[in-house]
Amino acid sequence: MAGLELLSDQGYRLDGRKATELRKLQARMGVFTQADGSAYLEQGNTKALAVVYGPHEMRGSRSRTLHDRAVINCQYSMATFSTAERKRRPHGDRKSTEMSLHLKQTFEAAVMTQLYPRSQIDIYVKILQSDGGNYSVCVNAATLAVIDAGIPMRDYVCACTVGFVDETPLADLCYAEESGGVSSLALALLPRGGQIALLQMDARLHQDHLETLIEAAMTACKGVSKVLDEVVRQHLQEASVLTGE
Amino acid sequence: MARVQVSEAEKVYILHGIRDDLRVDGRGCEDYRHMEIETDVVSNTDGSAKVTLGHTAVLVGVKAEIGKPRPTVPTEGYLEFFVDCSANATPEFEGRGGEELGTELSNTLYKVFNNKRSIDLKSLCICAGEHCWVLYVDVLLLQCDGNLYDAISVAIKAALFNTKIPKVHISSDDEGGKEIELSDDPYDCMRLNVENVPCIVTLCKVGHRHVVDATLQEKACSVASLIISVTHKGTITCMRKVGGGSLDPESIFEMTEAGKRVGKALHAPLMKLLEQEESLGKKRQKVGFLG
């Protein structure tokens, strides 16, 4: 029965968190030197690696070039050892293709593509360990990677997956909660203006609860944006110390 | 593999340097670049290791699953290799672009481990003819800066050393069938003996000399390479020539001797490092990609 152990009477979840508490977020930018931008992000037990190449000339089909802005190309893939049961194919299955399209849609809303007409920006995200909230961790890691690559964006893109159990919204779901039959909603937000880049929910939820759930998701995303901002400033400080400014 | 374009003047410079045993980054012909190894990086695998050799970064995860043994060898388990050349390394590997290189790498790994001594496959047997442990060794290529085989083989050795396979208890139920129980205690596990696991050494022929651990620039100047897998005793388990150029028999013999020497010298410090890391136990601070 879903919802039985997911939120105890004292308000604690399976891993001891409170309903609105996020998992521990640790990140590092500039992990790889060969790529234009790279970042590694851990949210609880979910680990993702994002790498950005670009902006560069269109590779492959020249016919897809856009005359007034850059094309964003995303690929989402999971390491075969990332899930509890070994995954046969890292990418190419329907779920990965769908995730890649979602990432593309999210970043087209945030990256200032009009500055780079007739070029292409590649964003590749790899999940090294999967413990729920895959999409959100990917978006957060990819934001840091795009910033590391020096590509201008309108705002940070922060994402969070929230669920609804016992009339309470739970922020940042882990795998046990996601697969426990909770109605989950994934939201990607541009925090400063409060603009939503992507909203996805595929479960049953009563209309009255929708607003509370979206509010909870937006609060969680704003929390994530504070951590990401801190990481970026830290990285910038380290880089400026190294160049001797 | 990621291509690097080298001009004629650069090629001549590299060639002359190697002729005098001095490479572009100051190494000798048989020196490796700075190598960093860390095990137990991914926690939901049975064993994992991350190796950084210069700019080449490789992550290996080992997962043990119960399966049916091969009909020709019912008393042994087996290893399955899969190499994933991810798009992180270079945009050319996007979609199916990395499949060709991945298949080539995994086929070579199968050949390297295709002998009785590298891993004790009999210890992977649970019930002869019915159940055995299958070790899925998954290699993830994160960054490509030449010398993939060496980095992958060191990472596989470290990951297999780190692998903890749960102990199994077989009991027979009422109908005479076998029931398998895995022990719940995470510390009650079986470890693998990786002493005989070979390490691969790639030697590239540049001019009249050969170099170990070539960077992409040096690879662009070489015509052919020799891949040798060497155990800690100096035994060769697999040898392969790759590349479009041709090699004469004397240089193959010379390169084999050099490969054996270099490979043999790689094992002792590696095992010492792995044992040292293991002895730190719980106190070890896991760094992973955050360091």
Image (tube, coloured by chain):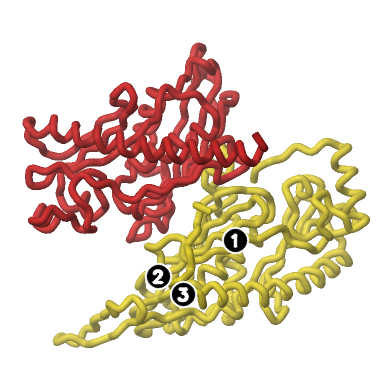
Front: mark 2 or 3: 3
In front: A84, or B223? A84
Local secondary structure at mark 3: helix
Local secondary structure at mark 1: helix
Amino acid type of the residue tagged 1 in the rendering: Ile
Place of residue A149 in the rendered image (x, y in percent of width and height, measured from the top left):
55, 32
**Is A74 drawn above or below residue B58 in the view shown?**
above
**Number of marks in the rendered image:** 3
Instruction: Looking at the image, tell me whether mark 1 or mark 2 is earlier in sequence order.
Output: 2
Q: Residues within 10 Å of mark 2 (few under 14, many from 20)?
A: many
Residue found 35% across the figure and 34% down from its top: A158
Residue situated furthest front in the rendering: A245
The N terminus of chain A lies in quadrant: bottom left
Picture quadrant where residue B184 is located: bottom left
Q: Is residue A198 left or right of residue B85?
A: left
Amino acid type of the residue tagged 3 in the rendering: Gly
Residue tagged 2: B64
Compute the Cα span from label 2 to label 3: 22 Å
Q: Which mark is residue B170?
A: none
Residue tagged 3: B281
Residue found 21% across the figure and 44% down from its top: A20
**Is A146 drawn above or below residue B140 in the view shown?**
above
Compute the Cα span from label 3 to label 1: 25 Å
Compute the Cα span from label 1 to label 2: 19 Å
Residue found 50% across the figure and 52% down from its top: B290
Local secondary structure at mark 2: strand
Q: Are marks 3 and 1 in contact (CB under 8 Å)?
A: no
The chain letter for the residue carrying disc 3 is B
Residue tagged 1: B152
Colour applied to chain B: yellow
Colour applied to chain A: red
